[in-house]
Amino acid sequence: MNRVSQLLATLLLAAAGATAFAQTAAKNKLLDRVIAIVNDEVITYNELQGRTLIAEQQLKRQNIPLPAREVLTRQVLERLIVDRAQLQLAKETGVRVDDATVNATVARIAEQNGLGLPAFRERLEREGVGFARFRDDVRDDIVMSRLRDREVDNRIQISEGEVDNFLAAQAGVQVDATEFNIAQIVLRIPENSSAEAIEAVRARALELMQQIRSGGDFARLAASFSVAPEALAGGELGWRTAERLPTVFLDAVKDLKPNDLAPLIRSPGGYHILRLVGKRNAVDSKLASGPVQQTRARHILLRVSDATPEADVRRRLNDLRGRVVTGGQDFGQLARLHSVDASSTRGGDLGWLYPGDTVPEFERAMSALAIGEVSEPVQTPFGFHLIQAQERRTEESPVERNRLAARQSLRERKSDESYAEWLRQLRDRTYVEYKLEES
């Protein structure tokens, strides 16, 4: 659900920015023209300028100093090229998203914002975002996600030996683990580059490192020069546990102090400049080395809609809670009658839950309950819940569960690396003709 919230923010900003530029262009009678040809499609001047405006808004919101306009424009153009190449490949290879899936995603975004679909559509229009344009952006995002699943994630293989080695390396690790926040600048090396071209990229990377050591702003330089997907977020990868970082990254930053630069790293795709933004203790870990407390719980889920606004949902849940606590009615029977979750057919039973199996809001409320106690209404990204803790038990962490967690951690680590390499290869084989200099 967090991804849905991020998608909404990105698409709102993108669509609003493009709309604002289109309005300005129309007012000033700006003529559109071709800026680049990507295979057999074009990127236009107005499209590029609209996306550049969006990038500027994103950087300002994050308090990142803006690069020179021409530098940022070229960065944005490269992003447009890569996105266009992905959408073209998806179309050529039959990746499709039907209207029902788009509609369900838009409805989920609306629900995440506590709105029914008509009210959400009105909000978009008030902010200058056409609903049809918003749906198209949602569709493109889903298409690129499915393409990544098919071309990258579904092809990742994790051997039993890798799992064994991972678990052996994690042996003795306590529940608290270290998380790292790393920022990176990636300079791409095209396929079949000559030794001279590779050396030129390396020299450029070393020059940027010297600028940073001399006080240059890392985030601005990332937005200006990095080819990584997170460049316009200042290059930050966000907080990740050690197992989610490429080994070469972890080895480079684990002994650094915040704001230190790591030695320059070479990967198949290019050169990486890494800065350790921060380091902290994580409060949870996917792997458990000792006893684990499980809770067996059940719940009743209601969602906000046009017909049932939040106040009505809370009132209904409080009424249901009173019927259990003071009226003695069976929680499971009420779940069967009223819950909108798939678990309603089981009386709301969620089975035995491990730490981390549910969203944080749900887990905190559940963990605070005594056995048999029913919570007050609890809000999560999925809606509003009544939760009842039925049983608790403590057991040694199951071997198979740890192996599954290890496999998932390895998959996440490989996914980021594989996706970056796949994008590099896709970009290298995409025909691009620049017309920017002619504008």
Image (cartoon, rainbow, N blue to C red):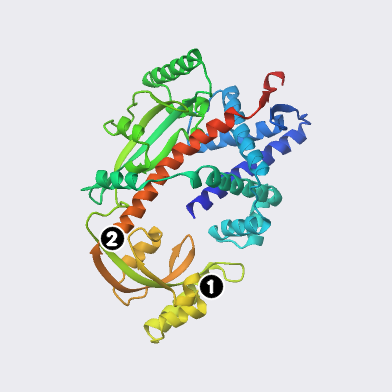
The picture places residue 4, in percent across and down from the top left corner, at 53, 52
Please name which of the two marks, 2 or 1, marks the residue nearer to the observer. 2
Q: Residue at x 50, y 74 (%)?
A: 339
The picture places residue 357, in percent across and down from the top left corner, at 38, 60
Mark number displayed over residue 202? none
Amino acid on which the number 2 mark rests in the picture:
Pro
Q: Residue at x 60, y 34 (%)?
A: 82
Q: Residue at x 69, y 41 (%)?
A: 19
Q: Is residue 419 left or right of residue 373?
A: right
> Helix or strand or loop: what does disc 1 sit on?
helix
| Residues packed near mark 1 inside 10 Å, few (<14), some (14 to 19) or many (20 plus) | few
Above/below status of 389 relative to 85: below
Q: Is residue 164 left or right of residue 203?
A: left
| Residues packed near mark 2 inside 10 Å, few (<14), some (14 to 19) or many (20 plus) | few
Residue 81 figure quarter:
top right
Any part of residue 381 in sight: yes
> Helix or strand or loop: what does disc 2 sit on?
loop
Quadrant (top left/top right/bottom left/bottom right) for the C terminus: top right
Q: Cα distance, mark 2 to mark 1?
A: 42 Å
**Mark 2 and 1 residues: CB-CB less than 8 Å, in contact?**
no
Any part of residue 126 in sight: no
Q: Which residue carries the number 1 mark?
A: 312
**Mark closest to the chain's N terminus, 2 or 1:** 1
The picture places residue 433, in percent across and down from the top left corner, at 68, 24
Viewer-proximal residue, 198 or 46? Answer: 198
Q: Which residue carries the number 2 mark?
A: 398
Residue 178 figure quarter:
top left
Q: Residue at x 64, y 61 (%)?
A: 117
Amino acid on which the number 1 mark rests in the picture:
Asp
